[in-house]
Image (tube, helix red, strand yellow):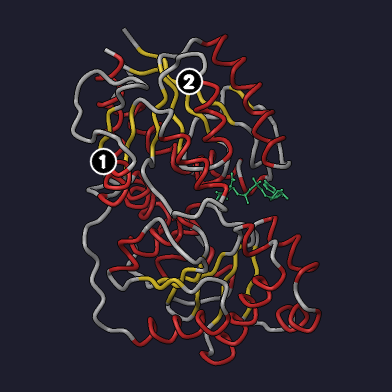
Amino acid sequence: MKKKIITIIGARPQIIKSSAISRAIRTSFRDDLEEIIVHTGQHYDENMSNVFFEEMQIPYPDYNLNVGSGTHGKQTAKMLEGLEEIYLKEHPDAIIVYGDTNSTIAGALAAIKIHIPVVHIEAGLRSFNKRMPEEVNRIACDHMSSLLFSPTQTGLTNLEKEGFDITYRGKANADTPVVYHCGDIMYDNSLYFSKVSDEKSTVLTDTGVEKNNFILCTVHRDSNTDVKENMNAIFSALLDIVKESGLNIVLPIHPRTKKKMKDQLDEVLYDEIQNTPQFKIIPPAGFLDIIALEKNAKMVITDSGGLQKESFFFRKPCVILRPQTEWVEIVNNGNAILADADRIRIKEAFQKLIHKKDYTFPNYYGDGKAAEFICEKIIEMLN
Ligand code: UD1
């Protein structure tokens, strides 16, 4: 009999991630799985949410809780209430959550309390920094899950250290969870949408940049945008890099960063950025555009987890605007450098990576078929 699963999405990267599983269900598992999609409404701007459903052919959500923005407690509480109601009405056989956002923790917590099995995709990742809301969310979510899918070997090792029996292959439930190392569904998506992006994206012409003459940059972490000193250090470094290298910087801007730039940046720096034509601040980019930018950039500078990895998929070096990362492989292999929000370290990392010649790109993230593997294992658990 067909099993019913509910997929919880809310933040931009989850909408993107979920497309890989929805696609796999549509093409290979439609007789086994029925998917109901619930959008918490954590992200709600047109270009933070809607655009992805259209261009990535994701079915529109069956429910939208419209929780919007708020403090962590308030936002998560609203989600819990709404999700529980839907679970009680729909009686799913399992729910799927992605990554580490407030939508992830709410989806998992509402489910385990009423004994619905939780499937966590992107399990095991750790930054070992509990000041990050995401670190708290993913640890808690992993420990509420029945099926855990780690994209990397590092994730698997992290789970083992926390007491998970990673060799267990019996019946999966919350007390005896089953853990798999399955590769990264974002690698599936990057491969799949790379061709579509070549055909459809016009972002390079629209932005006025050419292949290899620009840096792709994103900044959105609260530790960078909400701490004045950090935001000034990052944007000063970017301006220095633009001036010294002659490259353009393309910065698709998260709504939170846009709001904070004016309040937090020193006036002179803010004005200089506005008056430097090489600084190209554009609205948040859709997935096809972000792929086109990643593929054609000279380098990526970011605090986003997704972009760090996608820069590796498209063989670009990356300066990471964080003190630590969950994607340690790319740092250990010399593809990326942790520079935090430190003006000097950001500039040094840029110089080092731009002059480095001996890049290698080992296969850390699977074979592009993680979604199929995940669906098979979910079906196995439910039968
Ligand atoms: C969330 C995730 C983060 C993820 C990111 C991806 C948590 C704790 N964090 O961070 O892990 O990397 O999504 O993008 O869940 N805003 C808008 N319009 C929107 C969405 C947000 O204006 O559509 C503004 C609001 O001012 C809001 C702020 O951005 O307060 C932060 O949004 P929020 O969803 O709380 O966290 P993100 O920073 O987006």
Q: Among all residues in the image, which is located at the extreme bottom?
A: 244
Q: Neighbour class for label 2 at 10 Å: few (<14), some, many (≥20)? A: some
Residue 182's tag is 1
- Residue 334 lies, in percent from the top left, at 31, 73
Of residues 300 and 382, the one nearer the viewer is: 382
Please say if the residues under marks 1 and 2 sit with CB atoms less than 8 Å apart.
no
Q: Mark 1 or mark 2: name the one nearer the start of the chain.
A: 2
The residue at 61%/41% (across/down) is 50
Q: Is residue 352 left or right of residue 42?
A: left
Q: How many residues crowd around disc 1 within 10 Å: few (fewer than 14), some, or many (20 or more)?
A: many
Q: Look at the image and tell me in which quarter the C terminus lies.
A: top left
Instruction: Write down the residue under mark 2.
Output: 112
Badge nearest the viewer, 1 or 2: 2
Cα separation between marks 1 and 2: 23 Å
Q: Please report the residue visible at 57 percent of the width from the left and 72 percent of the height from the top.
A: 341
Specify the quadrant that holds the N terminus.
top left
Q: Is residue 356 above or below residue 158?
A: below
Tag 2 secondary structure: helix
What type is the residue that disc 1 sits on?
Cys
Q: Residue at x 53, y 76 (%)?
A: 209
Judged from the image, the secondary structure of the residue bearing numbered disc 1 is loop
